[in-house]
Structures are given as C-alpha cells and as structure tokens.
Image: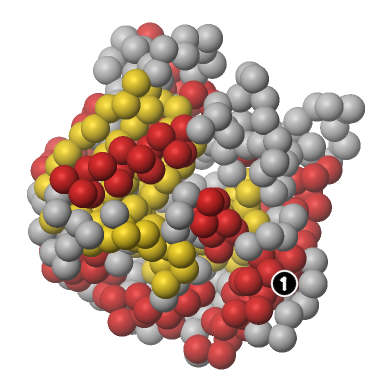
Amino acid sequence: MLNPKKNEIRKPTKTISGITPVAVMLPPRACKHGTCTYCPSLNVPQSYTPKSPVVMRASEVKYDAYEQVKARIKAFEVMHHPTEKIELIIMGGTFLQYPKKFKNDFIKKCFDALNEKVSKSLTEAQKLNEKSKHRCVALCVETRPDDCIQYIKEMRDFGVTRVELGVQMPDDKIYKKIKRGHSVKDVADATKALKDAGFKVGYHIMPGLPGSNEKKDLELFKKIFSDERFKPDQLKIYPCQIIKGAELEKDFWKKRYKPYTKEQIENLLIEMLRVVPRYCRVMRIMREIPPEYLIAGTTKIDLRKDVEEKLRRQKNKIVEIRFREIGFNPTENINMKLKVTRYDASEGKEFFIEIVNDEDILFGLLRLRPRKDKTAIVRELHVYGKSLEIHKKSSAASQHRGMGKMLMKEAEKIAKAEGAKKILVISGIGVREYYRKLGYKLEDSYMVKKI
C-alpha cells in the first residue's frame, strides 16, 4: 500500500461512524455442532478462506492477539485515522467455545496491545485501559444462538458490549437442511437474555439458503422485525455464496442448488432495506470472499453502493441507521431535536432515543431497556460523525458537543418515569471515565447511578 499524502485519510469511511474498528481473528477451531453446508473447511478459521484479509493478517503473526491489535493500530495510524476510540471485534464465530484460560489470555493480550504495556492480569489491563491512549470503547464477539446464554457473566467480565448471532434465516426447516444445529427458539431465547443483560444484539442474515426462495426470504426477513421475539439492533446481510470446500459445492455441481443471481440479490436487498426500522443499523452487506474461492454467486462486493444509489434516486424513505447517519449525509442543517421511538421486544420495552435534524439525519442515539427489578439499562450510547481524539473538539464535527450528555439525561428521565430507581450502562472499558463524570460508579462490570 502506498503511504497517504500529508493530511490525507486513506479509506475515510473506516472511521466515519465515530469509532475505529479493530478486527482480531481467532486461531482455527472446528464448531462443536459440526459444519454447516455453506461453510468451507480450508484449515483456517471456520467460514473463512486462507486469503480472507483478516485471516492473512492473523496468520502472519500466528493468530497472536497482541500482534494483531498492534498491527491494525499501526495501519490505521499510517492511513491517518484516529486510534483513541477502538472497537475490538473478535472474529471466528466460536470464541465462547474455547477453554476459559485461552479466552482470558486472548482478551488480555488485546488490552495489553491497546495499552502498549503487558499487565499481570486482565483486571489490571482493563483498569489501565480506562485512561490509556487507545481505549476500548466497545468489544464485540460473534457466536451461535445456542451457545451464548451460559456465557453472559463471562462476557461481561471480559468487557463485551455487543454480541453478533449467526441467525441466517429464522426457520427450523432451513436450519435442519443446512445442518445449522440450533432452533428458532434458541435465537429468541438468546436475543432476550442478551438484551436483558444490556448487550447490543446483531444478527448475521443469509438470504438464498437451500430450502428458501426470494419470497420466503422476504417473509422471514419481515418476521425478524414484526415478531417481538427478535427485533435486533444491527444486521449484517450475507447472501449465500458457494465457496470452495463447502458441502454446498457438491450440491451445486450436481445441480441440486443454485445461488441467487446479482439481479435477484439486488432486488431482494432493495425490498429488505425498505423493511428495516429506524432503530436497526445494517452494518454490512456482502462478504469479501476472494474470487479464487468463490465457485458461484455474485462477485460484486460493493453491491450495497448500487442498491443505496438506486434507493436514493427513487427517493425511497429508508430509515435504517447507517443510511441516515451524519457521516454519510454531510449537512449544515444542525436544527437538532430529540426523537423517541418506543417498541416492544423480547418480553420488554425498548426506548430508542435519537438526536436528528428536520431532514431526519442522525447525529446520536441511545438504547434504553427498563427492567422488572426497578432498574433500566442503557444498551448503547453512540454519537456519530468522524471519530475525534478523546480530548479534542472541532466546530465541524458532531462528536464532543454534549450530545451524549443530552441523550443520557433523556434516558434518565424516561427510566424514572418507568419506575426505575437505578440506571445501569453496559459501558466499554475505555468509556468508564466518561460515565464517572456523569455521576456513575462501577458495580459488577456495569456503570450504575441511582435516579
């Protein structure tokens, strides 16, 4: 890669949402349930290929967590991105199935790399990260719906704030056909347990699986947002592709299965994006599969760009978060106001609080979930816009202008009206200092305040 010119930010969209994402890949390990039919087995982490960018980076350092984090931070600095607010993403899909000591050491090494200092324990590393140069403001793990509830306390001890579930499509017949190894009930149960504990919940969705079709996919997708058992906060949409080394490859050559064409996927994505409610963010569309491993399925990685351009030309009213956030919609219209959306989900109430302007451009958001024990939990607080260093301000930027405080004040007001005596925040380790300034104290991995 050529070094960027002075003051040039290479790949600016990487940090346009206010944080710097650092993906860390786990060493190869087979899933306990076996292998899904669409998943390749290529002696690398499950579902990835040897030439997937994150795998290539990880394999160069023998999957060492410390070296991976260190290298990614260096790469972002070279590309002139800020690196003070880091979102760690533990990739590989089977993290929770590893031995406890491995998990503890892996997370500790991530924090050690952020702190640029090796600590004696994970607790010490986390404490140090509260004031370090590179702060972990969010920590995400990918996992299975049937293999996460038992690990909720453990995830909180690690500092996890977001959990991504491999849901694919919520249909038991499809699950059986693809050898998924869990049920729709597992998805619902995991979603509820995670929300009750304060986690932000993401779903990985896979249209075009064996046993489905475009009509059924759209019906199941609508169900994700009409059925109160689901209603995720985020989505990644990965249309089914045939990858070398997957069982599905055999079905393709025997003409028992055919993936969607580019046109079919594009039309389906347009309909799906029209359905996504304002409280959900579509984080990514399409996986980056190296062409030499792709047997069949569209090779167009930037299909999202085409779909969104078409939607904007057609002046469709798309309300999903990423489509509306300030980073992708530069504006001088700062006539901002609070907007609250209340909805029922996972046997509870959710309050989605936004700061928007009169064009519905999104500047910041907060997710609040009142609980039955007279507490309410803040599952996410996020101010959008170009990432700024922690102690800096900019008249042209949306971060560090008091929006977070405004959202927290509204959340406390709503929580009190809902009968809560105490409000909890599922805070990233590196954001604890921010909440302390708002009167919150650390209690059992949450930031807590009496109201």
Task: Please identify the quarter of the rendering in which residue 59 is found.
Answer: bottom right
Count of numbered labels shown in the rendering: 1
Residue where numbered disc 1 is placed: 112
Q: Position of residue 410 (x, y in %)?
A: 31, 38
Instruction: Please name the amino acid that badge 1 sits on.
Output: Asp
Q: Position of residue 165 (x, y in %)?
A: 34, 62
Side (left or right) of 172 relative to 2:
left
Q: Residue sitting at 50 percent across and 89 percent down? A: 100
Residue at 54% x, 36% y is 17
The quadrant of the rendering that contains the N terminus is top right
User: Is 397 left or right of 7, judged from the image as shown?
Assistant: left
x, y (%) of residue 308? 41, 22
Between residues 443 and 112, which one lies in front from this camera angle?
Answer: 443
The image quarter containing residue 16 is top right
Task: Identify whether 70 is placed above or below 359.
Answer: below
Q: Is residue 229 above or below residue 82?
A: below
Residue nearest the observer in this picture, 238 or 203? 203
Q: Is residue 188 toward the left or the right of residue 328 in the image?
A: left
Q: Nearer the viewer, residue 181 or 128?
A: 128
Quadrant occupied by the C terminus = bottom left
- Tell me which corner region of the image, top left, top right, bottom left or bottom right, holds residue 322: top left
